[in-house]
Amino acid sequence: MHSANNYLLEQFVRDSTNHRTDEYGGPVENRLRFPLAVVRAVIDVWGADRVGIRISPITTAPGETPPDSNPMETFGRYLDELSKLGLLYVHAIEGQTQTSRATGGVDFVALRKRFGGFYIANNQYTLDVAQRTLAQGGADLFSIGRPFIANPDLINRLRTGAPLAEAPKEYWYGGDSTGYSDWPAMDGQIAMPEK
Ligand SMILES: Cc1cc2nc3c(=O)[nH]c(=O)nc-3n(C[C@H](O)[C@H](O)[C@H](O)COP(=O)(O)O)c2cc1C
């Protein structure tokens, strides 16, 4: 479930964007009411062990959306409730998406500990940063996005310390496969999906 990047569900969660005066606005338990109702509806169909959720406690994009006035408390409560529902995983964008890992006062390792299921950490992870976070108990899994574009064999490159290619951003959003999914692996092969 997408509850990140200031899309609809996150607009309910943050006090900066939720200006409602009914039972869906005001105190944190009210602001969580709609997102949790959506989570319950999805769980009713698929089962909690097949449902994960994406959150982005301090991301301001898009639209330079202000963060919640107390993201630690608000997202801590959100994770408490998601834990009770037995969700399989939380996927957290830590910092500003694609821009910075500055946490704006949010302790992501402490936040992670509020959730009983798996925690997938995202945003600007390198092998070094992932290893440090893992040692602190800050994540179970890491999601790596952009480096996979130009390095279809990213895992092998990280294992062997091989250099990483960098895909120019102009090819990311639109166009065809050029510069997006035509990058060769170290052996010169273009990765093809397995049949
Ligand atoms: C080409 C491209 C498309 C993306 N599309 C989405 C999207 O549709 N929804 C979303 O929440 N994040 C999207 N993202 C953001 C990534 O999921 C991820 O949060 C971000 O790239 C930071 O991770 P990274 O530093 O490992 O790349 C996209 C990123 C890229 C590069």
Image (cartoon, rainbow, N blue to C red):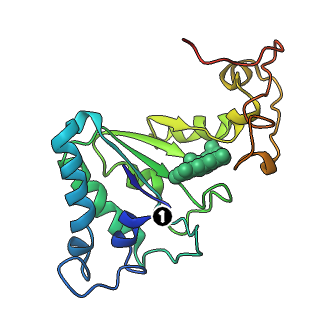
From the top left corner, tell me how far across and down residue 58 is, in percent.
Answer: 51, 66
Q: For the residue marked with disc 1, what is the amino acid?
A: Val
- What residue do we see at 59% from left, 34% from top? 131
Q: Would residue 160 appear left or right of 119 to someone viewing this image? A: right
| Residue 34 place in picture, x, y as percent | 24, 66
If the image is split into quadrants, where does the C terminus sit? top right
Residue at image position (54%, 38%) is 143
97 relative position to 118: left or right = right
Image coordinates of residue 167 in percent, x first then y, are 80, 40
| Residue sitting at the far front | 176
Is 169 drawn above or below residue 185 in the view shown?
A: below
- Look at the image and tell me whether residue 19 can be seen: yes
Rendering quarter of residue 59: bottom right
Indicate yes or no: mark 1 CB to ligand 1 under 8 Å. no
80 or 165: which is nearer to us?
Answer: 165
* Residue toward you, 54 or 134: 54
At label 1, counting other C-alpha atoms closer than 10 Å, the crowd grade (few under 14, some 14-19, many 20 or more) is some
- Which residue corresponds to mark 1? 106
Extreme bottom residue here? 21
Residue positioned 47% across, 59% down in the render: 56
Judge left or right: residue 173 versus residue 60: right
> Is residue 124 in view from this perspective?
no
Q: How many discs mark residues in the rendered view?
A: 1
Asked whether 149 or 93 is in front, the reply is 149
Q: Secondary structure at mark 1?
A: loop
Q: Is residue 30 depicted above or below 36 in this figure?
A: below
